[in-house]
Every structure is written in structure tokens, then in C-alpha cells.
Amino acid sequence: MANASVLSSDPAKVAVQIGRYLIDVDMFPVFLMAHFSIACLMIREDSKDLGPKFRQNHPMASWVSSILTSLAGVFVTNFLFGTAVVDIIKEDKLIIVVTIIWYFMNYGPFDLLFKIVRLPPVYMALSLLQENLRARCIFQGLQQATKAYPGAVIIVLLAGVINGNGYGYVRIVERLIRGKWIPGSNDFLEVTYFAKSSLYASAAFMLQRSGLIAVKEELVYLSVVAVFMIFRVLITVTPYKDPLLPIERPAARLLFGVGDMRKHAGETTGKIENGKIESKKKR
């Protein structure tokens, strides 16, 4: 009853409590398993054009790609900040969990896990859990980079972006492991919503910590999670993969001239990066 009175009389305090809970809650196993499931699903979907028996003929390539995709942010961060790239492999528990999900996603009886994860309600729920994990990765990436490089704004921002969108920067390498070469599919050439939203979230966290945003850390965190989840719903249920484009278009035209931004707004490619389940042709 006491909790109910707090909820009804002081919603601002409740929001702070929810934000603190989201900051502190353990991401393992629920949130990480949701992310691993979507990552393994994405690898299987993205391998369809490599042959109907790719999974059966090349299980090692499929497994390595799934590991790399599931832990992409850690691999890239370790590479850029001078830590051993394979250091994350010491986390036996994570590798074992990814491997179990990968196996049942690709070789499980009756394709049961694959079919369940593809169900729209299940996929939506996993996607929302993944957005919570993405916010946490950005938040923790900023904390770690700030401790290692205090005052280095660009490095700290870079750490946040990479932790929130690691796969975008290893996609070419990951696809090469599976024998797939698409040089244009990188987040430097075509900056995705997930890279941009990671940058904006990193900037919001940094502005709050510097005192330029006079709002409690918990409220900023809760706001970032809420925006991530709302946009992920839009990406999943609509044909548009970048809900930020309508906001960015006027500034982009002013700074860089008129480009073919409608092309990016209407593309759906079916990968984990844009929240789709099935591949579709670009418009």
C-alpha cells in the first residue's frame, strides 16, 4: 500500500526509482539472452542468399559470426582502446549461452526456437529488451571511457557509440567470415539509426554529467530507454528504418545540401540493425 501511495502522489520520484532500477538491474540472463537470440536470428536470415544448406555445410563460420555479432561492441571497444580483442572470450558463461542459443536457432528440433523468435509478439518483446541492453551498454561504455580518458570528449563519445552499435562497425568482417562481400554495408558509408541514436544518447549522458542538463541521471537514463523503445516499435511495425530522418533532414539540407535522404528513410533490409525480421528489397 505504501508503494501504491508513492506511485499516485509522487510520479517524479517513481520515475527516478524506475530509472535507478534500469541502471542497476542485472542484464544477465534476460536482457543478454534476448540480444543473443536476435543476433543469432539475424545471422541465419542474412545467410539465406549463401545457399539453402549454408548452416549445415559451414557450422564453424555460422558460429563465429554469431559470437562476433553477439559481442560486437566489446570486440570493437577492446580493439580501439588497446585491450586484447579476444579478452571477452574469457567470459565462458557468455560464450556458452551464445553457443547454446546459436545451436538451437540453427539446428534445434523442428526449428522450434527459430519459429518462436520470429513470431511478431515474441520478436517485439525481445527487441524491447535489447533496447534496454543497448542503453546500458552506452551508459557503461561512457563510464569506462571517462575513467580511462578523463576530459577526452571525442574518445568518450566514440566509446558510447561503439557500445551502442558495435555490429555496424564489424558487419563487413563478420560477413567475410561467411563468404559474403558487401563493401557498401558499413556504418561509415550509410550511418544507421542505431549509430545516430547511440551518439545522441551518449551526448545526453555526457551533458547531464557535465551539468549542462540539470536533470537527475536516472531521469535522463529513463528518457533514453523510453525513446529507444518507442523508436524500435516504429522501426519494427513500419517500413521505415530511421525515425530520426524527419528530424534531421532540415539540418542536413542546410549543412550538406539536398541529398537522396528519402532512399534511406524507405529502405528495409531485414537485419537486426533496423529491427526487421525478414529481408525485403530496397525501394
Image (spheres, grey):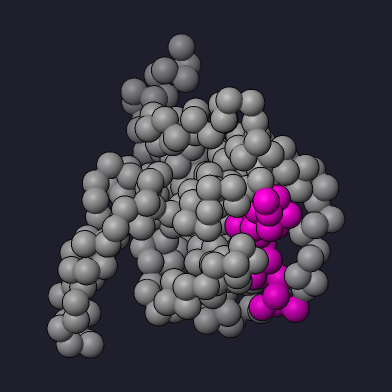
Which residue sits at x=46%, y=12%? 1
Q: How many marks?
A: 0
Residue situated in front as seen by the camera: 116 or 144? 116
Which residue sits at x=17%, y=87%? 257
Which quadrant would the C terminus be assigned to in this image? bottom left
Q: Going by the image, does 51 lie left or right of 93?
A: left
Which residue sits at x=18%, y=68%? 262
* Residue 185 image position (x, y, % from top left): 44, 71
Confirm whether residue 16 shows in the render. no
- Residue 107: within the magenta? no
In this view, 140 is above or below 102:
below
* Residue 25 image position (x, y, % from top left): 61, 38
**Magenta region: which residues?**
57-82
What kind of secondary structure does the magenta stretch mostly adopt?
A: helix
In this view, 282 is above or below 103:
below
Q: Going by the image, does 43 lie left or right of 281?
A: right
Occupied quadrant, residue 106:
top right
Occupied quadrant, residue 119:
top left
Residue situated in front as seen by the camera: 184 or 242? 184
Confirm whether residue 3 shows in the render. yes
Residue situated in front as seen by the camera: 14 or 84? 84
